[in-house]
Image: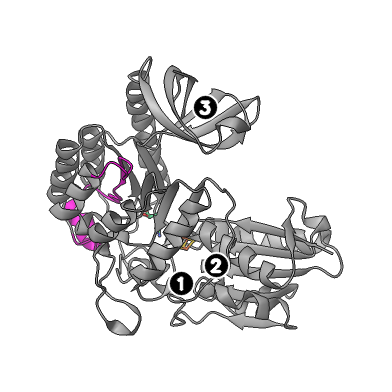
Amino acid sequence: MTKKLFLKTLGCAMNVRDSEHIIAELNRIERYDLTQNESEADLIIINTCSVREKPVNKLFSEIGQFAKHKKKSAKIGVCGCTASHLGADIFKRAPEVSFVLGARNVSKITQAINSEKFLDINIDHDESGYAFGEFRQNPYKAYINISIGCDKKCAFCIVPHTRGEEISIPHEIILKEAAKAAKNGAKELFLLGQNVNNYGRRLSGGKKGELNFSQLLTKIAEIDEVKRIRFTSPHPLHMDDEFLEVFASNPKICKSMHMPLQSGSTNILKAMRRGYSKEWFLERAKKIRQLSPIAAISTDIIVGFPGESEKDFEETMSVMEEVRFEQIFSFKYSARPLTLAAAMRDKVDIATAAKRLLKLQTRHAQILDEISSDYLETVHEVYFEEIRDGGFVAGRTSQNNAVCVKGGEELLGTFQNVKITQPQRLILYGQIA
Ligand code: 5AD
Ligand code: SF4
């Protein structure tokens, strides 16, 4: 008999892929079907994120809710970055939880569910060569890990403490997985790592990889069935000319670059230990647009980092004006345990941070309105990947714009030229041209 799994995934694309790995590993032994209803689940897993404080606080009230509504025999497990970070404390605060499995220990999931109580949060555990089982939520696009962990020590970021040191996955494993996924219908691949353009710097055991990121991209693009390649996240510091030239010139690489700015002030960037200045960032963004005028650039911005003055914040606003990011993920700084910034003085008060965030987001909404209105009547190649409510099918342009047209399953996994008839801020509506 098949069992039912309720799996809640928070956080980044890496976590989404970890959740797929969890499902694949469980299915090696017995079949689990996903359910959205925790009260009918045989197993409840929360794959957590710890990058900001809020979701961490919510975790325990959520566990309480699940414990109240779950089947008596159902186990509750906490996986992911908060599991790595809080470890055994989770058992203390929530005795209903029967296993805690860190972001770097996903391959132990079967062991975890078969133990009375199970804890593994060892961030030195090396899964870079582990052959996970096969499972993909969406058959039309495939997430592929190219590295695990992160060696950067950005002052605000907890990730090095939850995902451990950076190790590149051997290129042979990546190329095999890419070819297999593409053969199975995933024409679009999404390469994942905390710091993808640092790929190859260190393999398991300390050896340097044979390929750097630019060479890896080129090799993957040589696979016939692969039609599109995306990746996240690159680091602005490692955006050398070779990488930007491959990005711009290889037709299979989607023209969408995520360039996490964090702050536009060189002083704050220094305090954040980002390793680049405002000028470097602007010059790299300019180079991307020079090499590929159609490229879209997205970013992450933190406001209210300790010591951020009004002038520093205005520098962030000025970078936004200059680059005109197509998408911004913006956050109020959240102090995280174990990080350098947590101990910094000169904290920005919450009201000031909230005011800055609102100003940034309001101005960006205007920029986006201007950018999206330019899309009216233009034609784009869209790769369709999911059904939406109301008889729509959704896909993405190379620049990562979400596009919806009327249609059904027949469009899934196909490329179509779409004329945009109704551009909105987050979705472009159109018709097959
Ligand atoms: N506070 C606020 N935002 C953060 N991020 C990472 N750490 C923090 C923090 N302590 C943001 C960064 C990163 C994104 C994934 O989350 O912008 O790029
Ligand atoms: Fe969240 Fe960062 Fe962990 Fe991803 S790597 S789940 S963003 S804490």
Q: Quadrant of residue 159?
A: bottom left
Assess disc 2: are there few (<14), some (14-19) or many (≥20) residues with their C-alpha within 10 Å of its C-alpha.
Answer: many
Determine which residue is flagged by label 1: 162
User: Closer to the observer: label 3 or label 2?
Assistant: 3
Q: Looking at the picture, does residue 235 appear above or below residue 200?
A: above
Asked if residue 214 is among those painted magenta in the image, a careful observer would answer no
Please name the amino acid that badge 1 sits on. Thr
Determine which residue is flagged by label 3: 404
Residue at point 24% right, 60% down?
215
Assess disc 3: are there few (<14), some (14-19) or many (≥20) residues with their C-alpha within 10 Å of its C-alpha.
Answer: many
Residue at point 29% right, 58% down?
219
Provide the major secondary structure of the magenta segment.
Answer: loop
Taking depth in this image into account, of 422 and 274 the one nearest to the observer is 422
Work out whether residue 423 can be spotted.
Answer: yes
Distance Cα–Cα, label 3 vs label 2: 32 Å
Q: Which residues are magenta?
A: 250-275
Q: Position of residue 208 (x, y in %)?
A: 24, 77
